[in-house]
Image (cartoon, coloured by chain):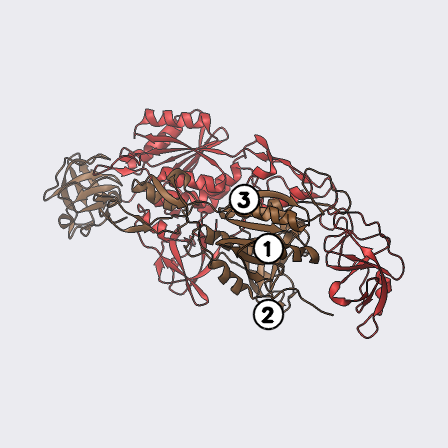
Chain colours: A red, B brown
Amino acid sequence: MKKDFFKLIPPEKAIKIINQFSSISEEEQLSIDQALGRVLSEDIYAPSDMPGFYRATMDGYAVRAKDTFGASPTLPALLEVKGEVKMGEVPEIKIEEGQAAKISTGGMLPEGADGVVMIEYCHIIDEKTIEVEKAISPLENVMLPDDDVKKGELILKKGKRLRAQDIGALAGLGIEYVKVHRKPKIAIISTGDEVIPINQNPRPGQVRDINRFTLSCLCRICGAEPIFLGICPDDFSSLKNYLENGLNIADCVWISGGSSVGVRDLTLKVFESIDGFELLVHGIAVSPGKPTIIGKVGKKPVVGLPGQVSSAFIVAEVFMSKLIRVLSGESSEEVPLEIDALMTRNIESATGREDYIRVKLIRKGDDLLADPVIGKSGLISPLVEADGLVRIDINKEGVYKGEKVKVIPFLSKGGLW
Amino acid sequence: MKKDFFKLIPPEKAIKIINQFSSISEEEQLSIDQALGRVLSEDIYAPSDMPGFYRATMDGYAVRAKDTFGASPTLPALLEVKGEVKMGEVPEIKIEEGQAAKISTGGMLPEGADGVVMIEYCHIIDEKTIEVEKAISPLENVMLPDDDVKKGELILKKGKRLRAQDIGALAGLGIEYVKVHRKPKIAIISTGDEVIPINQNPRPGQVRDINRFTLSCLCRICGAEPIFLGICPDDFSSLKNYLENGLNIADCVWISGGSSVGVRDLTLKVFESIDGFELLVHGIAVSPGKPTIIGKVGKKPVVGLPGQVSSAFIVAEVFMSKLIRVLSGESSEEVPLEIDALMTRNIESATGREDYIRVKLIRKGDDLLADPVIGKSGLISPLVEADGLVRIDINKEGVYKGEKVKVIPFLSKGGLW
């Protein structure tokens, strides 16, 4: 008597459903000092050209390019040095035929000059005279006033998650404040009569609430604000209260737990008891993570995650991270972080489901090896050992020792942050 | 007259020198709620077994494996159901020969039982009787008391940067507080008479201070605390004051700027005027980033970064991120984040220096393309467009269109955080 409570859908269909949620429409204005990692809710146009003036990109002498034409080490051009350009100032010097001015990288080109000869090609004869031993073209070693950014140009698009260099570009244009989407608030509920707070000593049969921590951390890493509502006992009216509370205060509710069949039913029953609830996903063809439930109440996603710690974690890494992207208003394309590696052993997989295998990365000479970390899905320790996940395609029966696979590093990497 | 002010060292030698700095010895105790991304300053041993009891990993019936031996769909084993195991409790039921107890995933095995038959293989005859149509081995579908973690086991090593799952493991073991290294404080000084604060309107010849923002963001991303000391004019005694201030309040000082030859000399002169200063690196064979200076005052690294915005940024990404790892006490091996992609065009490179090319990643069917973003090194906009860097080996003369390259994604990725 084989049975399955779920109407499994393929993982890419689950992703499509996740992508159809709406982003948080509320925005906030932040100083760019605080906007790193936040998602723009406005397009940013350049208020001015950058750098805004003709700027030297090398140390050397500002000259009229024409005066260097034909110059060579054996037949250098002799130029009169009119002075030196001071950094940060409009040069008072004007360059006329046969003249030059000393200039440093970043200095403003004096009037009349249209290029910079690198200092390496200039020979100082005396205070007033140099020999130039190389010809330059007009505008050589010069940045134009709008070379970096043109006034009116769209420099950062709505939906962009701001990186260090994006903040730098805003700074360069004098944009001190930007509008960003409010961080999505994710209410997290742990369920299970066997689950206890971590400051209590478990009696036999009890376990501490790990999911609260792994899921909250994942929210933070992805740019959401987790709100832990507590550990809920396995009964209908308690869970309904917790869920209603979550819907009131957050943009999205995750219920983890209900690993037993009865309780799994309970989560769905509680979802279905909420006015306007719509069931979107009841089981995904992945392992681990099959019993995942996704639905919505109005615009708010409500999610039932597995109770098993590593299953909950992997579903959160693979699917919930994308949900947070959507809620955050992020539209920039995801950088596909996948690392090529060679499997150290055969791993079987059932066709008809996508498998996520925890692996440790091992450097061996020029090769990078993906070594599966074996362990039951209820365990946290294999996740602690692992560096990432290998996805086995839904149509594949496994991967072989020595086969090249793509490793998806965990969102919170062991190494650099 | 070709000249070079620097004694260039190969980049791997610079990395070796960086790796010889000492980590911040001060530690702080944090609740695990606040320890995500921080670096452990103590080894963590498991205070107890986890889960600590025999635990079902499937929904089904707890049985004596022996009683199922030989069972098959045509010759099922008939077992008496003694009741149901309640989640989170020590079962009162004792399983004797020919008996079974209903159990959910995560439930504690009752005395006498040594395995769990999945519910899929059980046929309910009546309230008191089931037929089991599959044999199980002893301990099948059961987690042992120390399956996840053994008491006394080293579960997280000193020097580990804590990820979501590591925090989860600590939670599971009831470890509420951990000792971590204090975040390294990095004093950041911008220099240049042409550099102005971002809230001012630049006159021709002036530029806003971009490096302050890109470098501060990079510090945050890498887990350091940036302290911006201000924009310093290009003169010896001012810069010496700024540097001494930085050495007093921070663990490390970065001076960016001094893009002109004179000022470059100035930074080094100021470094050398500090008692006990030792010069370690004066120029790295990389492009961009050649004029980087690394030294130390006592244990504290002092760094001169290029003034050009994208040069400063790339040196910070490639080298300073590693310095922060070292100062942070991080010893976990770095996850080698490199993405395979195909170049969209030829890029030349001089041998004898390592080149970092800014590239945009483009998905094209199954292929990922690395498209160089061209732009002078003083520009910020090419960095805004780019997703990462392609490193061209010091001995290579370039990369060809269609060649497979490894893209190092920026530390603050455009997509997921």
Which residue is under mark 1? B273
Tally of marks:
3
- Return the residue nearer the eye: B301 or A317: B301
Furthest-right residue in this view: A97
Residue type highlighted by circle 1: Ser
For residue A6, which quarter of the picture? top left
Residue type highlighted by circle 2: Lys
Q: Which circle's residue, 2 or 1, is located before the other in the chain?
A: 1
Residue A282 in sight: no
- Return the residue nearer the eye: A390 or B176: B176
CA separation in Å, label 2 and label 1: 39 Å
Q: Residue A189, relative to residue A126: is it above or below?
A: above
- Is A343 placed left or right of A105 in the picture? left
**In the image, what residue occupies the spot 33% across and 24% down?**
A237
Q: Which circle's residue, 1 or 3, is located before the other in the chain?
A: 3
Q: Position of residue B144 (x, y in %)?
A: 22, 48
Furthest-left residue in this view: B97
Structural crowding at the residue carrying mark 1, measured as other residues with C-alpha within 10 Å and reported as few (<14), some (14–19) or many (≥20): few
Say if labels 2 and 1 share a chain. yes
Which residue is under mark 2? B396
Q: Position of residue A210 (x, y in %)?
A: 34, 40
- Label 3 marks a residue whose chain is B
Q: Which circle's residue, 3 or 2, is located before the other in the chain?
A: 3
Q: Secondary structure at mark 1?
A: loop
Q: Secondary structure at mark 2?
A: loop
